[in-house]
Image: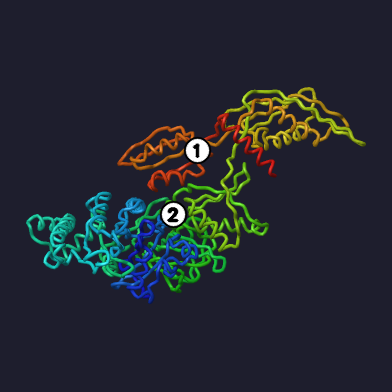
């Protein structure tokens, strides 16, 4: 592949609702450009993009594939991002490093939930886009109905620059509205050609004073003026061209590739990029040129047990050369660059450099991970990072065998390195390892990936809730530990005060004994016994918290007393005191923010009420409602699935820990019964 400058490169992300034919379209583009010699099919598991075994098995894209090709003396880096909502992290990363997007819509299915979602993501990133209505050859395909849905949802800035000639089995090809005249069109399209051309002319004219004057005077814009004005409207977000075709028949694909090169911006068109100098904390505007200081963002990391770590990076300015050294501005460490690669699906082609505006990969970096910026040490720069969404569904994972247990930690570490929307943590209360992801499919795929890539088999369970216990009234507790054996006996006598503390305080220990009734050298043993007893409460075996324990009296024996005796005595005294202190269960309460379309508000509120939620407020705006509420964690374990079902995939939410609160009595009885049943099993 030739070397290209930033003005000759187009980084374009393919987006869609799952099943719209995005991967088939990327395959057709590779075939049309002669980057591949054989057209693979998703159903056969033979596409360049979906090469991962899980993708082949499920027939969906799971991770973003990089698919470069050459067309019209330019290099196009296609980023084929997943359409399934669980893999939104891949979409966010691909959008961050692209200057343009093609949103694929199925002509038979029309507007779908995923179409709205990816449009919003592209809008948030300010990425110019093209809408491609695919599968026009399918039964029940309807271009004009789909166009109307797009216009109703996204506005009249969605305007066709092509019309299909025929549809379903009679689809023959596409009519270019920029070059065609009403007289060129089939008789059934003549009126539509005139109307749509006028809309295009108006959108193009509005970008330039001379063109608007010409348009208002009734003069027809030339083809060159129409293209120039339209490109400015697309780049400025004032127009979104709608195109049409069939990826499976490879019709309309070349025209789409032409439009990508002529209508979507290159890195040079996008202009200067903004980066922050970590030494001066000042922002700098940098040209996207090879001669500028180096700045490259790592947007994806894959972990392979054989090849090692493969790091995907987008160079924004400067250039990276093979066998060189760069500076990781996030880690403040030098990083050795070995062989650079151009990636196409799973194929790797060695290259000597990655220029400004281009995308490539490097293997076996020691320090660098996703969202890190690589630069020159003498001119450090930090680029804006990818804003990954927080995970919404958690499972507890257990190794199936002893061998799996030994490999579990490193495997989970590699997994979270590879996928920034996966988090792993150890719950200190339940002692479970918790893996959190974006949904059920995401977590299932991650568990399969650990098995396939790292040879670790896991079983998953719904996580246990980290309940806690506390007392509600102050009590005094006394315990005398006395045991006589053949030699020295055991003797310790303690009197403790137990007092409830404000919620969230934790536990405290103090000693205030007079007259040496308990010698000072035994007080650490008393504290140790108290702390051990607090690990396991009396109701359901959960840790005891928000409790102050004070040793105020006791007695000892000059021969039989010992540290172990005082530890045992204080442990028993605490358990006895907690039991007498009217103990209650506490549960974690979460702050949640649910974002939903207006029409689902009633159903979502009803569902939250059934989950013991306290709704704190609701903020309406632009057809969207944001509900703030506090909900027990126990009710939220499957909420990602519930919300998706209620809102047909249109709702989203964030959740964070707020505080612990007393569990209602009827729920407490259920938890105690379940805990007793569990302990009987073991």
| CA distance for labels 2 and 1 | 23 Å
Other-residue count near label 2 (Cα within 10 Å), few / some / many at <14 / 14–19 / ≥20: many
> Residue 134's spot in the image, x, y percent?
30, 62
Q: Residue furthest bottom?
A: 37
> Residue 56's spot in the image, x, y percent?
46, 65
Element class at badge 2 = helix
Mark with earlier residue (2, 1): 2
Q: Is residue 435 visible to the viewer in this orientation of the structure?
A: yes
Instruction: Say which quadrant the C terminus sits in.
Output: top right
Instruction: Say which quadrant the N terminus sits in.
Output: bottom left
- Residue at image position (46%, 63%) is 55
Q: Is residue 73 above or below residue 483?
A: below
Using the image as rendered, state which of residue 668 and residue 92 is in the foreground. 668
Mark 1 — residue?
A: 590
Q: Is residue 268 visible to the viewer in this orientation of the structure?
A: no
Give the numbered dot on residue 182.
none
Mark 2 — residue?
A: 89
Using the image as rendered, state which of residue 246 and residue 141 is in the foreground. 141
Q: Residue furthest right?
A: 486
- Residue at image position (38%, 63%) is 317
- Relative to 24, is 143 on the left or the right? left
> Residue 532's spot in the image, x, y percent?
71, 37
Quarter of the image holding residue 469? top right
Other-residue count near label 1 (Cα within 10 Å), few / some / many at <14 / 14–19 / ≥20: many
Q: Is residue 386 above or below residue 662?
A: below
Quarter of the image holding residue 678? top right
Using the image as rendered, state which of residue 82 and residue 605 is in the foreground. 605
- Relative to 410, is 639 on the left or the right? left
Quarter of the image holding residue 115? bottom left
């Amino acid at each position: 592949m030739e070397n290209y400058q930033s003005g000759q490169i187009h980084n374009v992300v393919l987006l869609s609702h799952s099943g719209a034919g995005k991967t088939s379209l990327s395959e057709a583009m590779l075939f049309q450009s002669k980057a591949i010699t054989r057209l693979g099919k998703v159903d056969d598991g033979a596409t360049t993009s979906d090469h991962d075994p899980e993708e082949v098995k499920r027939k969906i894209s799971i991770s973003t594939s990089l698919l470069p090709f050459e067309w019209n003396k330019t290099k196009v880096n296609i980023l084929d991002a997943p359409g399934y909502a669980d893999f939104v992290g891949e979409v966010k990363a691909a959008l961050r490093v692209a200057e343009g997007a093609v949103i694929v819509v199925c002509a038979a299915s029309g507007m779908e939930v995923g179409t709205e979602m990816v449009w919003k993501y592209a809008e948030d990133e300010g990425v110019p886009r093209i809408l491609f209505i695919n599968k026009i050859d399918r039964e029940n395909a309807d271009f004009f109905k789909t166009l109307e849905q797009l216009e109703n949802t996204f506005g009249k800035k969605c305007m066709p620059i092509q019309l299909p000639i025929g549809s379903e089995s009679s689809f023959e090809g596409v009519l270019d509205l920029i070059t065609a005249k009403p007289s060129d069109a089939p008789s059934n399209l003549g009126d539509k050609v005139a109307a749509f051309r006028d809309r295009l002319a108006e959108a193009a004219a509005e970008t330039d004073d001379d063109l608007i004057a010409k348009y208002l005077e009734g003069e027809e814009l030339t083809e060159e003026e129409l293209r120039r004005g339209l490109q400015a409207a697309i780049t400025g977000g004032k127009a979104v061209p709608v195109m049409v075709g069939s990826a499976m028949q490879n019709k309309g694909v070349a025209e789409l590739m032409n439009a990508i090169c002529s209508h979507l911006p290159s890195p040079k068109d996008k202009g200067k990029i903004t980066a922050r100098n970590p030494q001066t904390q000042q922002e700098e505007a940098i040209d996207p040129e090879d001669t500028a200081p180096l700045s490259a963002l790592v947007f994806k990391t894959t972990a392979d047990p054989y090849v090692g770590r493969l790091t995907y990076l987008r160079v924004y300015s400067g250039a990276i050369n093979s066998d060189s050294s760069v500076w990781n501005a996030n880690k403040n460490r030098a990083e050795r660059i070995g062989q650079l690669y151009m990636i196409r699906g799973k194929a790797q082609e060695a290259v000597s450099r990655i220029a400004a505006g281009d995308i490539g990969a490097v293997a076996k970096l020691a320090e660098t991970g996703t969202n890190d910026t690589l630069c020159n040490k003498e001119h450090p720069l930090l680029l804006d990072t990818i804003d990954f969404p927080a995970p919404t569904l958690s499972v507890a994972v257990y190794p199936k065998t002893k061998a799996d247990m030994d490999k579990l930690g490193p495997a989970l570490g590699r997994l979270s390195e590879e996928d920034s929307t996966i988090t792993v943590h150890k719950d200190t209360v339940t002692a479970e390892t918790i893996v959190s992801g974006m949904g059920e499919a995401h977590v299932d795929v991650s568990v399969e990936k650990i098995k396939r890539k790292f040879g670790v088999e896991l079983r998953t369970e719904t996580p246990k809730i980290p309940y806690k216990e506390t007392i509600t009234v102050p009590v005094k507790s006394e315990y005398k530990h006395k045991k006589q054996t053949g030699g020295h006996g055991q003797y310790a006598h303690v009197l403790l005060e137990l007092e409830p503390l404000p919620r969230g305080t934790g536990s405290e220990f103090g000693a205030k004994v007079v007259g040496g009734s308990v010698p000072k050298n035994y007080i650490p043993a008393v504290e140790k016994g108290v702390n051990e007893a607090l690990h396991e409460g009396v109701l359901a075996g959960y840790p005891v918290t928000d409790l102050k324990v004070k040793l105020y009296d006791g007695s000892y024996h000059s021969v039989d007393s010992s540290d172990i005796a005082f530890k045992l005595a204080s442990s028993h005294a605490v358990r006895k005191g907690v039991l007498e202190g009217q103990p209650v269960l506490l549960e974690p309460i979460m702050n949640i923010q649910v974002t939903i379309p207006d029409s689902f508000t009633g159903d979502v509120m009803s569902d939250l009420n059934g989950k013991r939620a306290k709704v704190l407020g609701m903020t309406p705006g632009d057809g969207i409602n944001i509900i703030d509420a506090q909900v027990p964690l126990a009710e939220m374990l499957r909420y990602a699935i519930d919300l998706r079902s209620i809102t047909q995939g249109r709702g989203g939410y964030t959740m964070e820990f707020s505080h612990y609160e007393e569990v209602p009595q009827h729920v407490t009885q259920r938890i105690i019964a379940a805990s007793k049943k569990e302990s009987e099993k073991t």
